[in-house]
Image: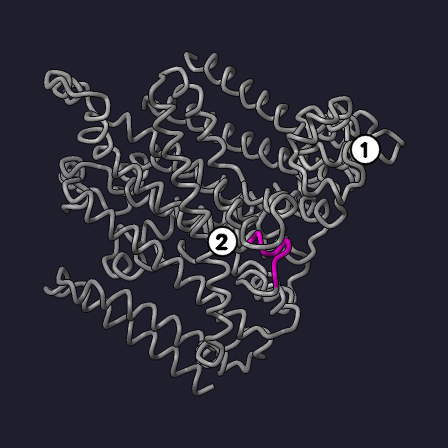
């Protein structure tokens, strides 16, 4: 009970500190901007730990974060094998193929107004569909190993990126295109110097959405059959054998991989679209 | 309306490509079936054929290629086969008065729809509440927004089986609640982001005007911020309901669900009936289309009533 009360008190204190920090005159400094969400996150973890310990929740139902951390540290070998199988082989290769295919398609579509009008609504519709459902089909077509996972990822990331690139390529204004025209710029020059740079904010929007989709696709596809390694495989078998702390460690890896992947994309975006109003603020 | 013709043209090209792809995808299955029926196939035996490319097989056995368009368990069914299977499990059963039998897609679609709407409602409420908190309190903004973004980079499917186990351990009967939690998790984020920009949409001069009227905070919220946010809300609701449907189907996929469109996909995989998978996929696509279109109509009607152009 004391543990639980302690966690609740910590929560109250941390919230008060955050409130003070957020309304203090240092509120726009970088340190405070980082400290507030970090403190909030730590509070959630401590609350979780306190609830599990204070209420004596069985570790089979919900392990405490400290137990998960211990398992994480003890089984880095397994986690690394799974990470390589699911993320590096399945998700990342599928992501790369899907992004390239979508870019090429978008450039081809963009040359014809007719195709753009026809494909944009269809692409938008497909981007909203639950495409993860094709996972069993891809597993039966491409086998159990990472190729089928990559195939699912390719299809999942294709449409959001296609739609965003096509929209981005139309983002230039007539005035700007006319200017390029007066310079006698060729199609390639206009594309490289004006339209692709102008499309970058849209492209990165698609790339960021696709990072999460890639991980989801790779993990779900493993539920339908995989070699005896991989994050999805470990999660589904871990639940069956009640090694829940290992499952949570896998979830932590997935969360970490997803966040870092997204963060890298956001970082590249900031470097490449520094001129855009959204990045200057 | 300008885009009807292009869309139809692109769709017919897609269907054409699909039909063309069926022949090479199914040629092995078709030849196996023909061989079992006693036909002469070059080369003999399905094992020797594994090393031969599908194009070679199609050239050597032109008479049997057509069989690939009518297999019982095709690798790639034709659109007509999928359509027939869809009709068999929906319209046909409805006409025989068994629309809600456990084999009909209406029944499974209804189960999926329930969880989707439940999760959508939960996610929307959470998203709007979060947005109000973010707009009105600096602490909430600074602590909630970064974690909300991080929460979306966590692949929810990794958590889905955990949520199902957790809720069954806590004594929640059935799978409706965990599925709804998963869809709410996917759905709240677009609503939160959209509503934050929506509630901040009123210009400073408009806020100042309300101040000169001596409007209270609640009045400002109800008469200015909320109406101004509606276009943003509807846009994010359309994204949110698609996400909620994805969440429900993902919640149905792992670990042995029995009813729901996702479960039909799972069962179709386990029993090796590709047509069931394909028809469930198309049913999910149709459901998504219906949900988004409904929201779109509501959006048009509401905004027109409020005097905003769409």
Residue B164's place in the image compared with B251, above or below, is: below
Q: Report the side of A6 relative to B41 (left or right).
A: left
Residue with the mark numbered 1: B98
Q: Report the side of A200 relative to B302 (left or right).
A: left
Q: Position of residue A239 (x, y in %)?
A: 62, 68
Residue B264 counted in the magenta span = no
Which residue: 61% across, 61% down?
A: A227
Residue A221 counted in the magenta span = yes
Residue B33 can be seen, yes or no: yes
Residue B82 can be seen, yes or no: no
Separation (CA) of disc 2 from disc 1: 43 Å
Which residue: 34% across, 59% down?
A: A260
Of A103 and B309, nearer the camera is: A103
**Residue closest to the far front:** B43
Q: Position of residue A256 (x, y in %)?
A: 39, 64
Q: Quadrant of residue B40?
A: top right
Residue with the mark numbered 2: A90
Dot 2 falls on which chain? A
CB atoms of marks 2 and 1 within 8 Å: no
Q: Report the side of A146 relative to B146 (left or right).
A: right
Q: Which residues lie in the magenta part?
A: A220-227
Which residue: 49% across, 83% down?
A: A54
Dot 1 falls on which chain? B
Q: Position of residue B153 (x, y in %)?
A: 40, 55
Of B293 and B11, nearer the camera is: B11
Q: Report the side of B75 relative to B137 (left or right).
A: right
Q: Bin the neighbour count of mark 1 within 10 Å (Cα to Cα): few under 14, some 14-19, many 20 and up.
A: some
């Amino acid at each position: 009970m004391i543990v639980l009360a302690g966690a609740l008190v910590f929560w109250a204190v941390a919230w008060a500190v955050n409130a003070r920090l957020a309304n203090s005159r240092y509120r726009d400094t970088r340190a405070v901007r980082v400290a507030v969400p970090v403190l909030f996150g730590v509070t959630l973890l401590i609350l979780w730990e306190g609830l599990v310990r204070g209420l004596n929740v069985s570790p089979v139902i919900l392990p405490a974060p400290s137990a998960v951390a211990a398992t994480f540290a003890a089984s880095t070998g397994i986690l690394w094998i799974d990470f390589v199988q699911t993320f590096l082989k399945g998700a990342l290769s599928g992501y790369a193929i899907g992004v390239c295919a979508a870019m090429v398609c978008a450039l081809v579509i963009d040359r014809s107004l007719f195709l753009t009008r026809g494909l944009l609504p269809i692409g938008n519709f497909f981007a909203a569909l639950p495409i993860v459902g094709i996972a069993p089909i891809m597993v039966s077509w491409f086998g159990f190993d990472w190729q089928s996972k990559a195939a699912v990822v390719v299809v999942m990331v294709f449409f959001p990126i296609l739609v965003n690139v096509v929209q981005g390529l139309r983002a230039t204004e007539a005035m700007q295109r006319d200017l390029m025209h007066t310079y006698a710029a060729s199609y390639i020059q206009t594309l490289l110097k004006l339209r692709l740079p102008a499309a970058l904010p849209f492209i990165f929007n698609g790339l960021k959405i696709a990072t999460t989709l890639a991980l989801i696709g790779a993990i779900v596809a493993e539920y339908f059959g995989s070699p005896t390694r991989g994050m999805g495989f470990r999660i589904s078998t871990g639940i069956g054998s009640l090694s829940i702390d290992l499952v949570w460690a896998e979830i932590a890896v997935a969360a970490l991989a997803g966040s870092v992947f997204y963060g890298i994309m956001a970082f590249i975006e900031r470097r490449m679209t520094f001129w855009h109003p959204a990045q200057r603020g | 309306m300008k885009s009807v013709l292009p869309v139809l043209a692109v769709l017919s090209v897609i269907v054409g490509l699909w039909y063309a792809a069926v022949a090479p995808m199914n040629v092995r299955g078709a030849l196996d079936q023909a061989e079992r029926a006693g036909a002469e196939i070059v080369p003999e035996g399905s094992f020797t054929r594994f090393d031969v490319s599908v194009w070679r097989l199609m050239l050597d056995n032109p008479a049997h290629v057509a069989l690939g368009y009518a297999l019982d368990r095709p690798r790639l069914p034709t659109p007509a086969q999928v359509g027939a299977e869809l009709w068999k499990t929906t319209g046909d059963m409805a006409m025989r008065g068994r629309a809600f039998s456990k084999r009909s897609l209406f029944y499974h679609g209804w189960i999926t729809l329930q969880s989707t709407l439940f999760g959508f409602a939960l996610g929307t409420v959470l998203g709007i509440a979060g947005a109000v908190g973010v707009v009105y309190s600096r602490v909430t903004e600074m602590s909630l927004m970064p974690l909300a973004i991080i929460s979306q980079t966590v692949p929810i499917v990794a958590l889905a089986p955990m949520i199902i186990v957790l809720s069954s351990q806590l004594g929640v009967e059935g799978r409706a609640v965990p599925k709804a939690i998963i869809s709410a998790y996917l759905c709240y984020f677009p609503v939160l982001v959209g509503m934050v920009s929506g509630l901040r949409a009123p210009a400073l001069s408009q806020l100042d005007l309300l101040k000169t009227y001596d409007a209270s905070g609640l009045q400002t919220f109800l008469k200015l911020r909320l109406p101004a946010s509606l276009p943003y809300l509807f846009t994010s609701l359309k994204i949110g309901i698609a996400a909620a449907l994805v969440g429900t189907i993902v919640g149905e996929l792992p670990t042995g669900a029995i009813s729901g469109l996702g479960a039909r996909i799972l069962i179709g995989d386990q029993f090796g009936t590709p047509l069931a998978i394909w028809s469930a996929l198309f049913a999910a696509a149709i459901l998504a289309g219906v949900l988004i279109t409904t929201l779109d109509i509501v959006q048009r009607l509401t905004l027109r009533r409020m005097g905003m152009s769409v």
